[in-house]
Image (cartoon, rainbow, N blue to C red):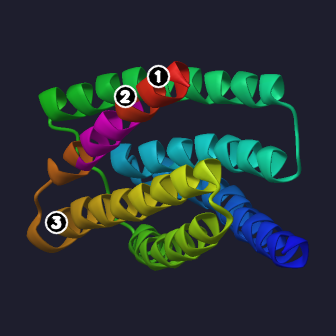
Amino acid sequence: MPADRDRLRRAGIVLEIITLAWNVVGVVLLGLLAYRSSSVALLGFGLDSLIEIGASTVVIWELTGADEQRQRLGLRLIGIAFGLLAVYLLVQAVVALASGHRATPLQGGIWWTALTTVVMFLLAFGKHRVGRALRDPVLLTEGRVTLVDGILAAAVLAGILLNALLGLWWADPVAGLVIVVYAVREAVYALRG
């Protein structure tokens, strides 16, 4: 039924707008927290959130009937951004590990990444349900990206907690390397279309 499809499409757009808003707040907050703590993991997660803003925008375009050429350009730009993120974070993480750089764990980083983990898992579940009902491959794919964002938030949280609770300073840059692997995978996927 067209009315059901319209309702589902609106639900998909609402889920993307929530994701977009969350990531906008996250970029600002994570930037401040990364600066104050010198955390490679928080910086990487903040930059990833910036890229995810672009990904959500591409999905909203697709759900509102934007043309295919615009979508391909958006995906290509996202792929390039993920590639640059991977290179930048790889250098940062290697330098931090080689120099023995110790990030300062902050309560704000712990709370934000814990909350983000939960929110991303809930949004991923919603996108999966709506995408499956619509049979929309773009929304289903973005739902998987949101699930991976939840997993990345959990990895960053683990790195911060291992550093804060056990003094394992290297856990922070290693969590940044987890984001590098994800960024490379997403860059290849987006650039291949």
Three-letter amino acid code of the residue under disc 3? Leu
Quadrant housing the C terminus: top right
Residue 87 in the image: above or below residue 18: above
The picture places residue 128, in percent across and down from the top left corner, at 53, 68
The crowding category of the residue bearing disc 3, from other C-alpha atoms within 10 Å (few below 14, some 14 to 19, many at least 20), is some
Tell me the residue at 53%/60% (across/down). 143
Q: Is residue 23 left or right of residue 140?
A: right
Depth check: give the residue in front, 88 or 105: 88
* Residue corresponding to mark 3: 162
Say which quarter of the image contains residue 154: bottom left
Three-letter amino acid code of the residue under disc 1? Gly
What whole-number distance in Å separates the C-alpha atoms at marks 2 and 3?
A: 25 Å
Q: Which residues are magenta?
A: 175-183
What whole-number distance in Å separates the C-alpha atoms at marks 2 and 1?
A: 6 Å
Residue 164 in the image: above or below residue 89: below
* Residue corresponding to mark 1: 83
Tell me the residue at 57%/52% (across/down). 142
* Contact? badges 2 and 1 (CB < 8 Å): yes
Magenta span includes 6: no
What SS does tag 2 mark? Answer: helix
Quadrant housing the N terminus: bottom right
Tell me the residue at 68%/65% (across/down). 134
Pointer 3 or 1: first along the chain: 1
Between tags 2 and 3, which lies in front? Answer: 2
* Residue corresponding to mark 2: 184
